[in-house]
Amino acid sequence: NAGVTQTPKFRVLKTGQSMTLLCAQDMNHEYMYWYRQDPGMGLRLIHYSVGEGTTAKGEVPDGYNVSRLKKQNFLLGLESAAPSQTSVYFCASSYVGGSNEADTQYFGPGTRLTVL
Amino acid sequence: DQQVKQNSPSLSVQEGRISILNCDYTNSMFDYFLWYKKYPAEGPTFLISISSIKDKNEDGRFTVFLNKSAKHLSLHIVPSQPGDSAVYFCAASNTGSNTGKLIFGQGTTLQVKP
């Protein structure tokens, strides 16, 4: 069981370039999430998905797009990268969104993105 | 508008003593609260949670207390160990939304000195 994996681990982009971050989970989870972590800000939700083929906006969705074509994968896209998108990005997954430990979100190791 | 706040960016305690990490929230719709622990260069890992129908949940050295009237929760670690040194995030959820969305605090960096 690999859990939640993220590709790539590190990336440097120039302003205006595009890229896609891949999140994969092998736990058969329904729900998946993308967060960004910035100093002093905690983790903020970018987009999330409650099932294959569905996506929704989180707290800070601007400048990002997502797709959930397969249950096990959740892709985060940056169409035109900006320096403000320099951050550490975490993907997470859970069975559903309930209130017991079985619904806990499991996080990937993160992707460190720098936009110059 | 920060709905979940951890007002202490850092905390330093001696090994064997108690660590108390605090968290405040503003949204009365939150009914499920969690603590995550994060080591450098790793993703957060779940530590302990509490539902709003309880005021205390214990798991080994870790206890979470919830004071709904004050909209305050705290994590107690007793006794603290050097391996507990990490960033601790509290998070809150409105389970009625059925989205599983978590709102995180800013984090508190705990250092446990040997």
Image (tube, coloured by chain):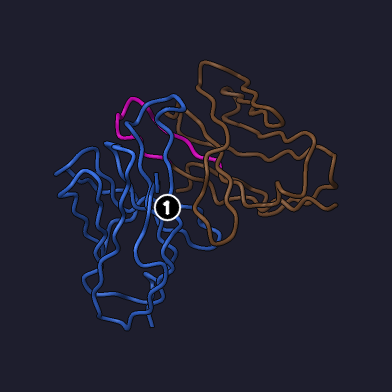
Chain colours: A blue, B brown
Which residue corresponds to the image point at 36% horizontal and 67% vertical from the top-left?
A8
Provide residue B59's location: percent of width, then percent of height.
64, 26
The residues colored magenta run B90-102
* On screen, residue A25 above or below B68: below
In the image, A61: left or right of A11? left
Q: Which of the 4 quarters of the picture holds residue A9?
A: bottom left
Relative to B39, A54 lies left or right: left
Name the residue at the top extreme.
B53
Secondary element at tag 1: loop
> Is the residue marked by circle 1 packed among few (<14), some (14-19), or many (20+) residues within 10 Å?
many
Q: Which residue is mark 1?
A: A108
**Residue situated in front as seen by the camera: B21 or B68:** B21
- At which x and y percent is residue B9? 66, 54
Give the residue furthest to the front. A1
Q: Quadrant of residue B23?
A: top right
Q: How many marks?
A: 1
Give coordinates of residue B82: x percent, y percent: 77, 49
- At x 47%, y 42%, the residue is B3
Amino acid carrying mark 1 in the image: Gly
Q: Tell me if residue B95 is in the magenta stretch.
A: yes
Q: Is residue A89 above or below residue B28?
A: below
